[in-house]
Image (cartoon, grey):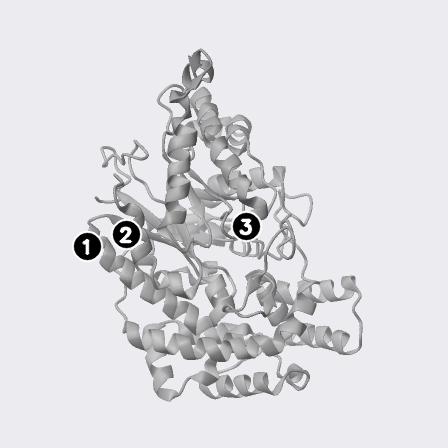
Amino acid sequence: MVVSTQKGATIHPLRRRPVNVPRCMSTQHPDNVQIPFFADHPVIQGETEIKEAYYAYSHLGCTEQMWDYEGKEVDHFVVKKLLSRYEQFFRKRRLGTDLFLTLRVPNPRVERAEAKVLLETLESIPRSYDAARLFYGDGAPPPIFEVILPMTTDARELNRVYHYYREFVGGKERQRCFDVSVGDWVGDFRPDRVNVIPLIEDREHLLRADRIVAEYLQGKEIEYQRVFLARSDPALNYGLVSAVLLAKVALARLGRQEKRLGVDILPILGVGSAPFRGNFVPARVGETLAEYPSVQTFTIQSAFKYDHEEEQVRAAIQHINRSARGEPQEVEEERCIEIIARVSARYAECVRALAPLVNGVARYVPPRRARKLHIGLFGYSRRLDGHDTHLPRAIKFCAAMYSLGIPPEILGFSALDSSDLAFVRTTYRKLERDMADALRYLNEDNLPYLPPLIRREVKQVREWFPCEPNEEHREATGRIMRALQGGVEESSTLTEGIAKAASVRQFLG
């Protein structure tokens, strides 16, 4: 199959419409410093997220919006509200063919307290179709036909979602209820199937992404399959270099699997603005496209959208939309995997030493989304590579590290020798740029307050990469460290300091 936007394009049996897979997916990641003009509160939630989706479609040029049900309150009536409030726009740009809404659902294996939210979300999809049919008329395209399953580790998890929807949601209309079929009673259920996009986040399963996809595709009439590769959580768990090399190996293997199966496998890469999380900012999109040529879809997170001039953001998204997907970069996989193992071990050692300080500072990072608790009874935190060290989620972790004047990118480099570094430089092509951008936020005045292990990492990185600190950021992080050392833990003082440093960076974390 050829991905096309032209009339007469191949019809996907799952969608029953021309294939038009987005290059940009707007997301709800809370990594922004500035508050968007349409929000009346720093914490974006509820009705504001409806406005945000419209803004991403209409003003920024994103053709896809992720609607996140994982760990946060969310509006189940998003399709109805978008169509009714912005009628003129959606008459011209059809939801389901020109623009797309993709649901991110909880994974019952991990999020037991939220498990039934998955079922509620799947049940809402036919209702969204009914709203679209009322708006567009009979023959309207399904406005929602794909869902993202986070923390995927096995094709069985994907198949459970796929078959639950097909048999218990889409298939419900054929069931009898007393004297009538459910379909005759309340109307048909469309779409009759949805496809499931695996979001793969850990080292073991990123390296098996190609096999997970192949197993899921068995027995299905699917012309293409999207695969979401995490970029932030691998960095949080294994370090910057490991995260990039993991993505490279996974993309190369998916590329070979695509050719073996004769099915387009279209990766999504979850990149953020922080160098640690991808360095995906409007001024750097060309470099990221070149770094990951086989990626079909890049995430446009909140800092990208709100911490830069709107015109610059629109131009960057237009550039991405006009670009074409290429072939995957071939890499020396065994060498990559060996380096990943060593860097991950050293990185974990460093983060365990920093965890108490990082967790303490993370409490004061200003919130940007109305999320449910992620620690304790109602949620989860991120464990460090299977160890008992618990960390905040990636954005708060990054925000805490940068606020301490210690860019997380530096951690793990002391596991490399000069030969390793030369190899990494040829594989991770924008390493120099990412490290230069990260090291602007290094505050060496804060090093005496940190463990010796961290000072060793800084020493190694300073020998290998140039460092031109941003003075405004250095002053802000110096004040934060002095406040911590002086016992000043008033939330307003630390939160203001963290926000000030983040404004300099143009991302929260």
**Amino acid marked by disc 1:** Arg
Res. 72 visible in picture: yes
Circle 1: is it few (<14), some (14-19), or many (20+) Cα within 10 Å?
Answer: few
123 or 277, nearer to the observer: 123
The N terminus lies in quadrant:
top left
Question: Where is residue 48 drawn, in percent x and y?
Answer: 61, 40
Question: Where is residue 265 drawn, in percent x and y?
Answer: 29, 51
Question: Where is residue 39 drawn, in percent x and y?
Answer: 64, 44
What mark, if any, has residue 214 been given in the picture? 2
| Left or right: residue 349 compared with residue 271 | right
268 or 507, nearer to the observer: 268
The earlier-in-sequence mark between 1 and 3 is 3
Instruction: Tell me how many marks there are.
Output: 3
Circle 3: is it few (<14), some (14-19), or many (20+) Cα within 10 Å?
Answer: some
Q: Residue at x 68, y 43 (%)?
A: 40
- Disc 3 target residue: 111
Q: Residue at x 44, y 46 (%)?
A: 148
